Image (spheres, helix red, strand yellow):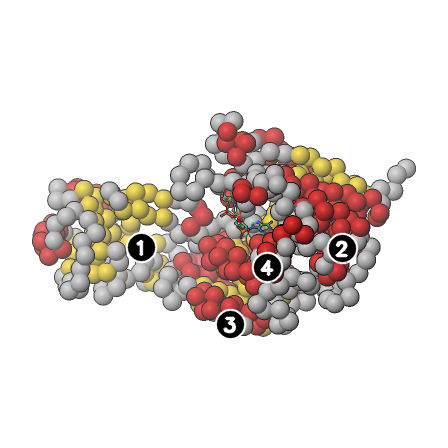
Amino acid sequence: MSSIRRHAITLIPGDGVGPEVALATQRILDAAAARAGVAFDWEEAEAGASVFLKGDQTGVPQATRDSIDRTRVALKGPLETPVGFGEKSANVTLRKLFETYANVRPARELPGIPSRYKGEGVDMIIVRENIEDLYGGIEHLQAHDVAQALKIITRKGSEKVIRFAYEMALREGRKKVTTASKANILKLTEGLFKSIGEQLAPEYAPIQANHLIIDNVAHQMVKDPAQFDVIVATNLHGDIISDLASGLIGGLGFASSANYGDGVAIFEAVHGSAPKYAGKNVINPTALVLSAAMMLRHIGELDLADQVEDAVLVTLEDGKSIPQDVVRQQGGDIEAAASTTGFTDAVIENLGRKPTSVPTAASRPRPAAPNPHKRWPDGEARRAEVGPATVIGVDIFAETLMPPAEFGTKLAALAGPEFELRIVSARGTVVWPKMSPAFDHPGFFRSRFVARDKSKVVTDEALFALIARVAGVATWFHLEKLRSWNGEEGFTRAQGE
Ligand code: NAP
């Protein structure tokens, strides 16, 4: 009987430079595996541009979904997404289909790679929430030339990723978790994320916990990046600061990442399809190779992961094969740079060697495969704890070019005995009953009606009748019920309300 350990892995080569970096990674992994009595059963699968071209608007065909369902592990090259128009990102679709809620992006100083922070010991992991936030992609043109995107943050989604960050920190011997948010401005969405971070921190007491406003995180990352250990953030902020982090350690050519769910994990480079380099055999494959090392740890092949990571470190350290992006940063002779295949050959030759100028992979804490918590909040119990919602009014968004004073006066007269018009606002700032002198008409207003008698239940019938009266004055396009839980308002006040 064969003693070879076999692993089935879905391989998505992807678009642009994807097939080149995927092939490089596959060759390195197969070479390392052959030395260690391991074999990979690669299931090659399609996603991205080629799939869109065939008319599948999801970008992720059923065969690819089925393969990942089977293998539970995917190694993925970058996928192209049309910018500003067209199909949704197949990357985001994949992350959502398999609920890979934690996107982990390490940024560690590498030997031989120039950066402004060389020698400062940059070694951080960014954990980005991967499903929610503006990546819901729920957008509408509310009025002519007025676009809106919904930012969705849930307690459950936030708790999952924040717990993941703390548990990863414990497993990997990390000391500090920084929760990053914009809770000063977005009190309910980012505020929820921040408060969950604060609630969970004491459960992970050995880990030092702090919170920073995301703009300060950006500032601190550029000023003193070595202060950071693990940072956990909502989706868009995490996306931006993780690209920033990759710039601290030599660029996107070195930035690896993993998307973890409770069942499936997808490993990919942070970079995109870099179309201008596609097919030229010049792209640096390190980012995907280091992502594959994360994958090997995830499937329990810890020694193999160390071997691959060490071979990359040795190759970078001895400087004989320098990828083109590094040569360009150093202002060196581009002709002398290693090709994608040349760099890959060098890494394969270096399998089994250990770096000398930086700690070996095995000397770092060895994380077991992620074992995310299943203690997600129970929806029913939470609903019982919070109690029922009370409807106290409605925000009606309507298109109009009427001056605010005229619009407010008209609507106030329509409020009827059940409601009062509390404010009219434009882009979140009160314009009725008071108006800022620098008011610039955006072509739409929000009118906030609240119940006159706080002790009475606001019925849908009363709301519908109010909306019908407002519709006689302006074209409404969006409604938001105003609700409270135990007297706590479930909406923010306008600037100046
Ligand atoms: P990109 O493909 O990441 O390329 C931006 C620049 O980063 C490149 O021009 C190059 O910089 C550098 N770069 C990227 N990968 C590199 C590597 N392996 N080695 C060295 N340098 C590298 O970003 P983009 O041009 O904004 O996006 C192109 C497409 O990729 C878009 O369709 C986008 O939606 C998609 N994308 C996909 C993913 C994903 O699949 N996860 C992620 C991001 C973007 P220089 O020009 O300075 O050489």
The numbered mark, 4 or 2, whose residue comes first in the sequence reads 2
Q: Circle 1 is placed at which residue position?
A: 483
Q: Nearer the viewer, residue 327 or 152?
A: 327
Measured Cα–Cα span from mark 1 to mark 2: 58 Å
Tell me which numbered mark, 1 or 2, is placed earlier along the sequence: 2
Instruction: Compare marks 2 and 3 and give the one earlier in the sequence.
Output: 3
Q: Amino acid at mark 2?
A: Ala
Q: Quadrant of the N terminus?
A: top right
Q: Residue furthest top?
A: 54
Q: Is residue 163 visible?
A: no
Left or right: residue 49 compared with residue 109: left
Q: Would you name the residue on which mark 2 appears? A: 311
Q: Secondary structure at mark 2?
A: helix
Q: Amino acid at mark 3?
A: Lys
Asked if disc 2 and disc 3 are in contact, CB closer than 8 Å, the reply is no
The residue that label 4 is drawn on is: 331
The nearer-to-camera label among 4 and 2 is: 4
Q: Which mark is residue 247?
A: none
- The CA span between labels 4 and 1 is 60 Å
Q: Amino acid at mark 1?
A: Arg
Q: Nearer the viewer, mark 4 or mark 1?
A: 4
Q: Residue at x 40, y 58 (%)?
A: 189
- Amino acid type for the residue under numbered disc 4: Gly
Left or right for 251, reference 41:
left
| Quadrant into which the C terminus falls | bottom left
